[in-house]
Image (cartoon, rainbow, N blue to C red):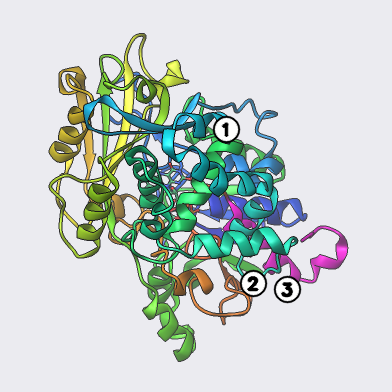
Amino acid sequence: MSEPDAVVLGSGPNGLAAALTMARAGLRVQVIEGAGEPGGGCRTTELTLPGFAHDVCAAVHPLAAASPFFRSVGLTTHGIRLLTPKVAVAHPLDGGRAGSISGSVAQTASRLGADAGAYRRLMEPLVRDSEAVLKLVLAPLRSWPAELRPAVRFGAEGLLPARLLAARLRTPEGRALLAGLAGHSMRPLSAPLTGAFGLTLMLLAHTTGWPVVEGGSGQLVAAMAAELAELGGSITTGRWIERLDELPAARTVLLDITPRQLLELAGDRLPAGYRRAMRRFRYGPGVCKVDWALDGPVPWTSQTCREAGTVHVGGTIAEVSRSEAEVNAGRHPDRPFCIVAQPGVVDAGRAPAGRQTLWGYCHVPAGSRADMADRIEAQIERFAPGFRDRILARSVRTARDVERYNPDYVGGDITAGAATLRQTIGRPALRWNEYRTPLPGVYLCSASTPPGGGVHGMCGLWAARAALRDLHLHNSGLVSG
Ligand SMILES: Cc1cc2nc3c(=O)[nH]c(=O)nc-3n(C[C@H](O)[C@H](O)[C@H](O)COP(=O)(O)OP(=O)(O)OC[C@H]3O[C@@H](n4cnc5c(N)ncnc54)[C@H](O)[C@@H]3O)c2cc1C
């Protein structure tokens, strides 16, 4: 390619979303990726045995399904199918009981017994205003909400710690469900904003569902890479960048990296105040990830778990809270809260006939070298006796391995920065536009910027819009929003 107009460092979903947004505006774009293939946290590989396709990182895609960026990619045109399990998420308890979310709010409420009314009161207004709420969740906080009432309501409830929000529910099933959803925040459930994680994921379960991608998450990347190629953009893989000045000259540089790497790549070029802000950026705990090849489905005692795409394994709200509190205090829980996905409930093609892949992780202290496979398997076995007998092979990645695989996962933190209150108000730092760095023409576009972790591409989209505005392309009609 002749000299590009824009260079994007890193080809995760946000890097590719930034690249596509720039290319759609008519710019020549080059993406540079250190790993041997594009995709960052959105790749699919045979991690265990031939014929078993495992999602290395992201597997479940309510955020992609809700994302205006991914809607713009025209996934169906590229032959991509999001497959939505009947049960979005289930949460087993001892004795064969389980809470689960599927279908409408009324249908889910009807299975929650004494919590039916409370669940409806919590979710009905959110689902009614889902468009406004999701717009808010997927945008930088500084954008003025289009509709104030739903934003205020969501803000007031979402600010609450999940433990407090769960006090509105009475049944062990209802309370455990909320705890498991809030556990995705990787924060103690007594922390503010953990309620927002629970509510958002519940809302998505009722609106988009929690789909997996037919054939694996890597298909999303393939679709983005194909559109980029059609627009004349290119992706160079296998090239790790250690200093910003190694990048090809370009008018705009978008960085799909986190503050720690920005300091390493550009430290001496950044003003002291911004350097201090980047050093203050906090990462969360890590994960230990396990993938299994199974000779059949997981034998969950509870039928609803057998139909669920995602299963939250960790018992009652008290147990989930304890597990997350221990991790945040730097300890490895004996009975960890585990997030497990079984794409095989909707995507038979992930494994040879009759067999299944299983994906799971638990949170661990940042930088942990601990192999938690035994403890995760013990938790699954607790709710699915006979599970261990179905294991044909497993692949384990400790938090250290996760960071080695992708330097954006500092210490194994899969969300590229803790979801604290401060880092929600300003991510990575308190600035009017968080995507701009003090270096002219250089932008951050990773999950360390708003709206944060997950495969939605919205950090890349918003960063690229800021860059296009600075190039004065916003008057050309090429940039909206
Ligand atoms: C185990 C796990 C499970 C997850 N599950 C889900 C899920 O189910 N659903 C969901 O929505 N999200 C999930 N996530 C989170 C999701 O994967 C990330 O939030 C998302 O990938 C962030 O996208 P990104 O573009 O910001 O960064 P990344 O996807 O992390 O991509 C960054 C890219 O930049 C490259 N890079 C970094 N530094 C350099 C350098 N110096 N030189 C060259 N290249 C560089 C990296 O190699 C990488 O390819 C999961 C993550 C993990 C690890």
Quadrant for the C terminus, please.
Answer: bottom right
Does mark 1 have its CB less than 8 Å from ligand 1? no
Mark carried by residue 106: 1
24 horizontally vs 38: left or right: right
Q: In which quarter of the image is residue 48?
A: top left
> Which is the main secondary structure of the residues drawn in magenta?
helix
Asked if the magenta segment contains residue 468, the reply would be: yes
Q: x, y (%) of residue 159?
A: 49, 65
CA gap between label 1 and label 2 equals 34 Å
Q: Do the residues labelled 1 and 2 touch (CB within 8 Å)?
A: no
Kindly identify the residue that appears in the image at 41 percent across and 49 percent down.
Answer: 238
Spot the residue most to the right: 476
Q: What residue type is labelled 1?
A: Ala
Q: Do the residues labelled 3 and 1 touch (CB within 8 Å)?
A: no
Q: What residue type is labelled 2?
A: Arg
The residue under label 2 is: 142
Give the mark toward the camera: 2 or 3.
2
The residue under label 3 is: 470
Kindly identify the residue that appears in the image at 18 percent across and 63 percent down.
Answer: 330
CA gap between label 3 and label 1 equals 47 Å
